[in-house]
Image: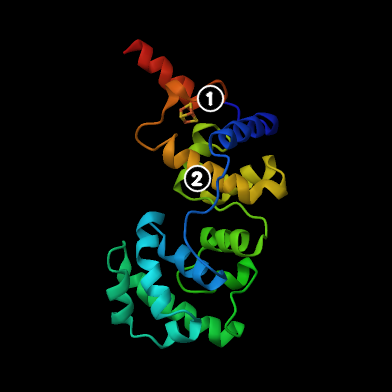
Amino acid sequence: MPLLSKVKTMQALHLMSEMFPDAKGELNAKNPFELLIAVTLSAQTTDVAVNKVTPALFKAYPTPEKLAMAQTDDIIELIKTIGLYRNKAKNIKAAAQMLLDEFEGQVPKTHEELEMLPGVGRKTANVVLGDAFGIPGIAVDTHVQRVSKRLRIAKLDASVKEVELALMKRVPEELWVKAHHTIILFGRYHCTARKPKCEECPLLELCADGKQRMKEKKKA
Ligand code: SF4
């Protein structure tokens, strides 16, 4: 099965952006520090759940200094409704300390430096760079992976990095950040993991997976 061409990928993206014209990050954050913490907390947790805990967390610890000095148990108390909260509490405290020790209390602006921070991987770094600093990147989360593979923008067995590269090859750099948010919303609300809405999908003609599903449905 050939992969989706650059032209067709852009058509698919255009159709997605018609469905979600205002796509942007759904995590609440007032500055790069808050965004870094919110994105770190969002691993394997919904943005909605993170947005419920961050107001109290940022009120108690509004700066890297305050967060670095916090007791881990006190952080745990504030974030215990989200997944992996114990590890995340340790990571954000350690990340705040590293911001102070290595980066003069500022959130760094390169992948390399961001990925030195505990709990920060390539996806988190991409989101922070794009949303806090406008530095182009495509953060590949579970939704971006699934949608890209169903549409055959990337191969079915592609790694996260390969999905990122496939998208970067097909989408102009100035659209990377927007594309990432658009695909996430499309995956979260339309092309969902369990019940993709293929029957009513404007991308059906472009989608290998969707066509296959419809064929199987007709047979059944
Ligand atoms: Fe997703 Fe189905 Fe649309 Fe393909 S046709 S993008 S699988 S909802």
Q: Residue 113's x, y, as percent?
A: 60, 73
Query: Does mark 1's beta carbon lie closer than 8 Å to ligand 1?
Result: yes
Quarter of the view holding residue 128: bottom right
Q: Does 131 appear above or below 37?
A: above
Q: CA distance from mark 2 to mark 1?
A: 16 Å
Q: Element under label 2?
A: helix
Q: Does 214 appear above or below 5?
A: above
Q: Which residue is mark 1?
A: 202
Within 10 Å of disc 2 (Cα), the crowding (few <14, some 14-19, many 20+) is many
Quarter of the view holding residue 80: bottom left
Q: Which residue is mark 2?
A: 184
Identify the amino acid type marked 1. Pro
Q: Residue 86's x, y, as percent?
A: 30, 72
Identify the amino acid type marked 2. Ile
Quarter of the view holding residue 198: top left
| Quarter in which the C terminus is drawn | top left
Q: Does 84 appear above or below 200?
A: below
